[in-house]
Amino acid sequence: MGKRILLAWEGGAGRGHVMTLKVMAEALGPSHLYEAALCRMDHAAEIAPLCELVYPCAGLYLHPGPRKALGWPRAATWSDFLGDLCFAFPERLKLQFDWWLDVLRTRRIDLVIGDFAPVSLLAARVLGIPSVCVGTGYSAPPPGMKQFPILLTQYTTLVHDEAALLANVNALLSAAGTAPLECFADIYDASVSMPRTIRQLDPYHGRRTEALLPPLNEALPRASTAGDEVFLYFSTAETAYAPLVDALCALDLPVRAYLPGVDAAIAARLAGSGVMIERAAVPVEQIAARSRMTLNAGQHGSICMALGLGLPQLAFPQHLEQEYHARRAADLGALDIVPYQAWTAAQIVDAVHALYHDTARGALARDLSQALYPDLFGDIHRLVRARVAPLLG
């Protein structure tokens, strides 16, 4: 009989977390029993067919008091952001930790696979359950770092003392009879660490001891040079910014959009202006055949997809992780960035038209796709099975 595998997601808002867990389950195959504990149920239907159970978990949510008191500086490190979520608040951290301990025990879990789920990994550590840390390179740091590095040089204010965060974790582990961690990054010391990214987007490139998992399957097609559509994917609250919606309605270009969770009135307005609204995720083969460029929020998966397809990108980052990935992609020449809620509709329209008609940027994107092929593509299922199957006995 197969093992019982828990697919855990504690924090974040995008669809990509669920899709990564889905890929892991598909790779390990139907001989095992899967259940998913998700901090948001928005995209639960996409993973449910693979699972015996899908249920809400104890999620990581912002506790903004200390950051607000300092004037809302942007989080300078991943550890500083984790401090905001619960690691700087011992009582909240204990509630989170105890919830996972209870689930792992009562559900008789044999393996934990966590995407943005650090407390679930700690609970697995205490119970001696093997674990796999997945996600982007940004959200799945390597263990062993004595201090988390600054992510973007324009954001350097630290709100939380990393030593205090470590002390909070070690207090939990001590109470559970488990040896303390040497550094805070060791909360990610899973049995296997396999973030899906490329070294060009990895904040911790050069600090890892385990290989990255390519973000794209090798079967992904390349874009057709005959495509004429703008493909748009926003997955959270991007369209709450009115000038962006105004711009999309005024583009006068063929636009195809997948906007899960978009407000119905906004969707109707976009459709009325000629935007083709998709009700389900668009197959990449169709994106490749139809598209000339993409608009996204700087989501890691969207950036990697467009890099693989060879499509220029215009990104509208909504938070620090998206800004980080967008800046790294911009360094490659693959992407232009629209500052957060700073541009008028006219400026956005001009930027889209400029990129749409820039044949040199299109050629650069296709050349970059070829150059990045070894980093971007791989047989994901084979690679996952090779590294995770030994944990299942």
Image: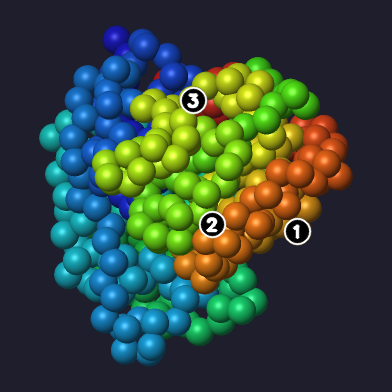
> Can residue 183 be seen in this snapshot?
no
Which residue occupies 44% across, 19% down? Answer: 26
Which kind of residue does numbered mark 3 sit on? Val
* Mark closer to the chain start, 3 or 1: 3
Which residue occupies 33% across, 26% down? Answer: 47
Alpha-carbon span between mark 3 and mark 1: 28 Å
Among the 4 quarters of the image, the one containing residue 374: top right
Residue labelled with disc 3: 282
Alpha-carbon span between mark 2 and mark 3: 20 Å
Depth check, mark 3 against mark 1: the one in front is 3
Residue labelled with disc 1: 331
- In the rendered image of this protein, does residue 60 appear above or below residue 355? below
* Mark closer to the chain start, 1 or 2: 2
SS label for mark 1:
helix
- In the rendered image of this protein, does residue 70 appear above or below residue 155? below
* Mark closer to the chain start, 2 or 3: 3
Alpha-carbon span between mark 1 and mark 2: 16 Å
Residue labelled with disc 2: 316
Depth check, mark 1 against mark 2: the one in front is 2
> Do the CB atoms of the residues marked 1 and 2 lie less than 8 Å apart?
no
Q: Which mark is residue 231?
A: none
- In the image shown, does 72 or 292 lie closer to the viewer? 292
Q: Position of residue 156 (x, y in %)?
A: 56, 81
